[in-house]
Image: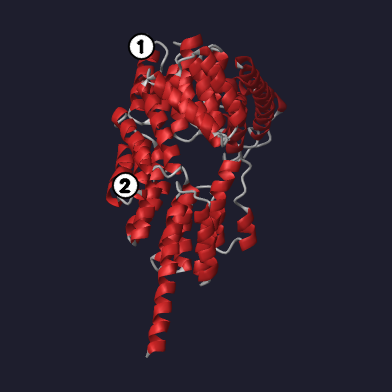
Amino acid sequence: MGMVLGVGLVFGIVIGVAISLLLGITAVFMTARVSKLRRHVWQTFCLAEIAFLVILFVGVHHYPHETGTPGSNYNILFLYFFFSGLAYTAVPGIATLLAFLTTLLCPKNPSANLEASDTQKYRTVHILLPLLSLFLGVGIVFAFNGLHGLCSGELKVGTSSNYGKEMLLGACRLSGQGKHSESINRYSDAIESGSFKGKELGDIYVRRGWSYNRLGNNACAMADFERAVQLNPEDANAFNGRGWSYVKSERYPEALADFNTAIRLSPRFSTAFNNRGVAFKEMGRRDLALENYRKAIELNNDPLPKANALFNLGWLDYQDNRLESALACHNQGIGILPDDAMGYNDRGVILEDMGQREKARADYSKAIELGNDPEAAAYARLNRGTLYLMDGDYVSANNDFSAVFKDKLPMRERAAALLFISLKDSGKKQGEIDKELTALTQGFVLAEWPASALKLFQSHLSLDEFAASYWHPNPTKRQSQQAQMWFYLGQHLLYLGQDEKARDCFERCLKLDNRDSNEWSIAKTRLAQIKSRDLTSRNGKKLDSVR
């Protein structure tokens, strides 16, 4: 892969040099002609060329290219290498052209009719001065960058023989603290230090891949795991990581193949058994999922996968409405991993279904406060916000749903749809809601399900278009999204005053028994409210008939 990136760099350099030569020769020729008509032309040209060289080089050097280091995303990196080579080598020609344009501002020479001999006398100087100013400008840039790197500690080569190891230790520490963005930077520094090769380098890519995964950046995670597999085809951790990225991409056959390889390479790899169980669950094979979770627990050789397998096993019990067993599994898992944010969130869901709402709220709050898992924090925000919404505490609900955007957490589409409902329930008008949502979602692309629910609420989609938008190729996901679709459709019909149709939609939602979603919980509440209104209305009519 390094050869491919090198080819990109060389192509960029060749094109940049050609551009510089063309622009430079043209600019010097034009400046020589201008010097016959204006005064102080060459002095202005040299000073301007030096200034523009410094400005352009610094600009290119500090331009915020798309982030990536070798192994993160090869397409991005190829373009980065190509355009870096092109930009740096094209700068001298562009600076020379800009210097020529600056000379057009010089005052005119009253005695512009120069003899040919005078012109001939300065021809050598016309060539030497631009070259001298070019070298001087480049020298200033390198001196500036060297001094800046020395002062800021960015010069990595030679500053410390243990630089790479220091960066790696710092990255591991930050990752353990849940500071995944910072850990990624340190892992990248360790990779670029050149201190690690082969298996050691592959292990760093695996670690950085998991940090990317925690931030929801599955594309970069996949690239890192792929690079780790290339560096060490016998590394079970690399195959397990890539398999998990396949799960996140809903490419379950590829995920199973990688988990199988990881288990073949390391037969007691409990993490791979747990993750293979997740893949089977997503494919609708609950029997095989249970088998793998139990195997991960039975191996009992690593507390992390054992706790995760307990959480996953408990979640299957929860989906089957075995709440006591589900709670016991989560209690045991949290006992092993007391700082697992997702464990607290999921236990909160179970407690909420058991009617222990305050304990559930406390678990959601704990998941948020831990701050070491963005995905868990997003679920906890949505779950706690939904609790507040059902309790009529709209201010707290709005704060939780808005925090998903403010903290740049995943699942923003769901947060936007639920925030609309909360704002609507609080009595705000459509115009106010649209204005608030526009301000909050600015800079974010809402494309995943249930983004179409928000479009329905804002009258940007018809009922039929929305009803068709839930479809998903995976049968398990399709059933889940179908249940959510019935809820959002019922909510919209409530806004239109069509209570009977809304009631039918909520009943359809509950019938699909998608109990592990916010929409299912709210649908249950909405249905109870409609039935209560109907009962009140019927009782009122009976009283009228008695009178």
How dense is the environment of label 1, judged by Cα within 10 Å: few (below 14), some, or many (20 and up)? few
CA–CA distance between discs 2 and 1? 50 Å
Is residue 123 shown left or right of residue 45?
A: right
Q: For residue 152, which quarter of the picture?
A: top left
Front-lying residue, 405 or 90: 405
Mark 2: amino acid? Ala
Is residue 266 shown left or right of residue 310?
A: right
Front-lying residue, 283 or 232: 283
The dot on residue 160 is 1
- CB within 8 Å, label 2 to label 1: no
Q: Earlier in the sequence, mark 2 or mark 1?
A: 1
Colouring rule applied to residues: secondary structure
Residue 398 horizontal/vertical position (percent): 37, 56
Q: Residue at x 41, y 44 (%)?
A: 379
Residue at which label 2 appears = 360
Residue 147 horizontal/vertical position (percent): 39, 21
Residue 233 horizontal/vertical position (percent): 56, 13
